[in-house]
Image: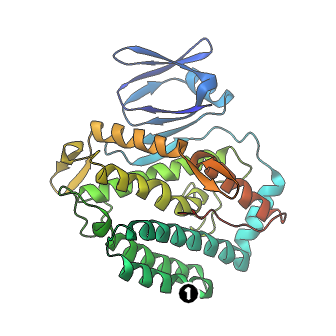
Amino acid sequence: MKDNIYITKAGSLKRMDNNLIFDSDTKTSLPIENIKAIFIFSEVNFNKRALEFLTKHKIIMHFFNYYGYYIGSYYPRDYIGSGEVLLKQAESYLNYEHRLDIAKKFVLAATLNSLKNLKYYQKSDRKLDIYIKAIENLKDTIKFQPNIEKLMNTEGKIRELYYKSFNNIIKHADFYFEKRSKKPPKDPINVLISFTNSMVYVYVLSAIYHSQLDARIGFLHSTNSRKFSLNLDIAEIFKPIIGDRTIFKAINKNMLDKSYFQFDQDQCFLNEKGREKMLLLLEDKLKNTTQTENKNTSYEYLLKEECYKLQKHLLGKEEYKPFVSRW
């Protein structure tokens, strides 16, 4: 099985024969046939020869800034692109009724997966009834939203309620969630939400690259000057069950404390130890399996499957039913 490679130390990436070599304090051989995607969180030098090698083997590379947030990707040329799929994807975006229908599916699935989290923790007497009822009431209005703007407004209200529930789920003295703050994150919970969201965005982007879909054409998130938008759409489904569940596990099982964070005036971010810990936990989550109909499936495979399901829908072969967790 191919692996994601996470580079958190400064160094250089070079081609040597049929391998990549990461040269830092020591030289590490990265057999090309075992690499799925490369995630770079530090200062890394590489040359045209290395990029050509990555392109030949269809390996996408994602870059993150000093604070650990996604800034862009090296996206090799499409290799399984389909003119038919591209046309159908564009047609569905330009047909507002079709676009709105797909966008509603994303928001509904994201809401149902958020509710799964709340109902799971409700069993532990976390006093989540008020949030569950309020979100369920808003969920029932999703299908009636007349346009994308009002749909996203509803989605925003649902997410605000969902975040307010976090202090009832998280049980750790070092972590208190006052309100959502992004640029910059003000506290460890906001840092973890932003970091895991970014990672889910790029995990989905990698999955889209290996499908026939075009990442530039989204439905919930408008296609505009932003390079990619479809990954933001599909990520909405998986942020609660990959990102948020990883956060809850890390905190409630005492895998994190304040020593994993750095505080700088009015902002907070993961230090190197914190990033490495969260990357290990997220990678573990991707490899974990969950029950789907009659089989156990890894979350990593679910991302790929979501792309294929949407692709079939656009081609008129099968109604798109986004993934909703069973627990």
Looking at the picture, does residue 36 appear above or below residue 73? above
Looking at the picture, does residue 27 appear above or below residue 39? above
In the depicted view, which residue is nearer to us: 39 or 138?
138
Q: Is residue 197 visible?
A: no
Quadrant in which residue 45 is drawn: top left
Q: Position of residue 73 (x, y in %)?
A: 52, 42
In the picture provided, is 134 more to the left or to the right than 291? left
* Residue type, numbered disc 1: Thr
Residue at position x 66%, y 56% in the image: 306
Residue at position x 35%, y 66% in the image: 124
Q: Position of residue 173 (x, y in %)?
A: 17, 58
Q: Position of residue 92 (x, y in %)?
A: 74, 69
Q: Which residue is mark 1?
A: 141
Please tell me how many numbered marks the rendered image carries. Answer: 1
Residue at position x 35%, y 37% in the image: 276
Q: Residues within 10 Å of mark 1 (few under 14, many from 20)?
A: few
In the depicted view, which residue is nearer to us: 224 or 318?
318
Residue at position x 68%, y 43% in the image: 210
